[in-house]
Amino acid sequence: MSWGEVRAARTAHEASLFSRANVVGVAVGQKVIHGHGTDEPCVVVYVERKRPEAELRRRDIVPKVLTGVRTDVVETGRFAARELVNRAAVDRTERIRPAPGGVSIAHERVTAGTLGVLATRDGHTVILSNNHVLANENDARPGDAILQPGPADGGRPIDEIARLEDFVPIAFNQRNLGAFGRFLERLLGPLLALLGLQLKRLPKETLNIVDAAIAAPLSEDLIDPRILEIGLVGVVLYHALNGVRVMLVDFWSKGPKYQRVMLWTILTIWFLVMIPGAGRILINMFAEH
């Protein structure tokens, strides 16, 4: 008996089976005899309660054979649809306490950025994000206020969540712009300043390895080790690692020759970092607080 024949029998008799009292489901599967599974394909009929045939009306008895295919009656109870329970949607631009990774945060003179993750430094917990988010592109001092949400998302002094602790300076190469460049800088500078922005030169000869800064929370009960959208964390980590591979392919003479090796290398690094990290994040996400 082929599975195609079993499915055809189920389809042909499905309406008839559901018309019987006590039947709550119909499927195909392998017949179970005296508690032991077999390799015999059959039509599985789920019933609310398994009863002796003597207690059933004749029209409610499930046939033992349907078009040459044997049946198997399985007691399951009544099926009931349950509401899908999801975590409450989080508006990452609102004030959230405790604040998890992924929500709006920024230096008091920056528009808004993202709270990355929590880290540990010298035995105490710190918030890790970017220099341009927490340190205003070097234009900040340790002790400056960090707001959650960031100012662009409505953050005010009352929303202070941390103080800037340290940052890795970003190197900006102050190259000679020429007469026309200086004219544009003088023209656009004041306009951008009105919007809370400023001109910065892109690095040329000096290599910036990271864009990072840390802030010390005012209290540890204001922060949450969980991270919103763990899948996004995995994607960002992969693209960060892959970006290194792409740069090596572009700027290293032997890069194209070894790009497949480098691909497998970054995938291995991603796996070694992401899998244990994801486990820890998920534990924090579902732990009771």
Image (tube, rainbow, N blue to C red):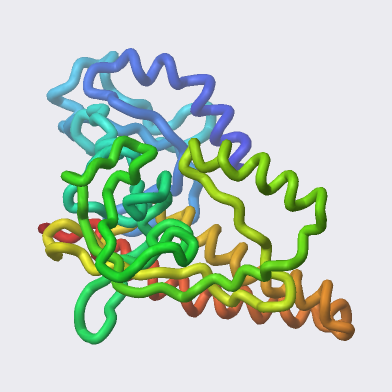
User: Residue sitting at 28 percent across and 24 percent down?
Assistant: 23
- Is the N terminus in the top left, top right, bottom left or bottom right quadrant? top right
Looking at this view, is 192 or 104 the one in front? 192
User: Residue sitting at 49 percent across and 37 percent down?
Assistant: 195
- Is the C terminus in the top left, top right, bottom left or bottom right quadrant? bottom left
User: Residue sitting at 12 percent across and 63 percent down?
Assistant: 219
Q: Position of residue 67 (x, y in %)?
A: 53, 27
User: Residue sitting at 51 percent across and 42 percent down?
Assistant: 193
Q: Name the image quarter holding residue 101.
A: bottom left
- Residue 73 seen in this snapshot: no
Q: Name the image quarter holding residue 208.
A: bottom right
Q: Residue 20 vs residue 54: left or right?
A: right
110 above or below 217?
A: above
Q: Residue 107 vs residue 6: left or right?
A: left
Looking at this view, is 286 or 160 the one in front? 160
Q: Position of residue 4 (x, y in %)?
A: 62, 37
Q: Residue 236 vs residue 20: left or right?
A: right
Looking at this view, is 149 or 118 the one in front? 149
**Count of picture labels:** 0
Q: Position of residue 16 (x, y in %)?
A: 40, 15
134 above or below 277?
A: above
- Residue 174 seen in this snapshot: yes
Q: Residue 5 vs residue 86: left or right?
A: right
64 above or below 16?
A: below
Q: Position of residue 180 (x, y in %)?
A: 81, 49
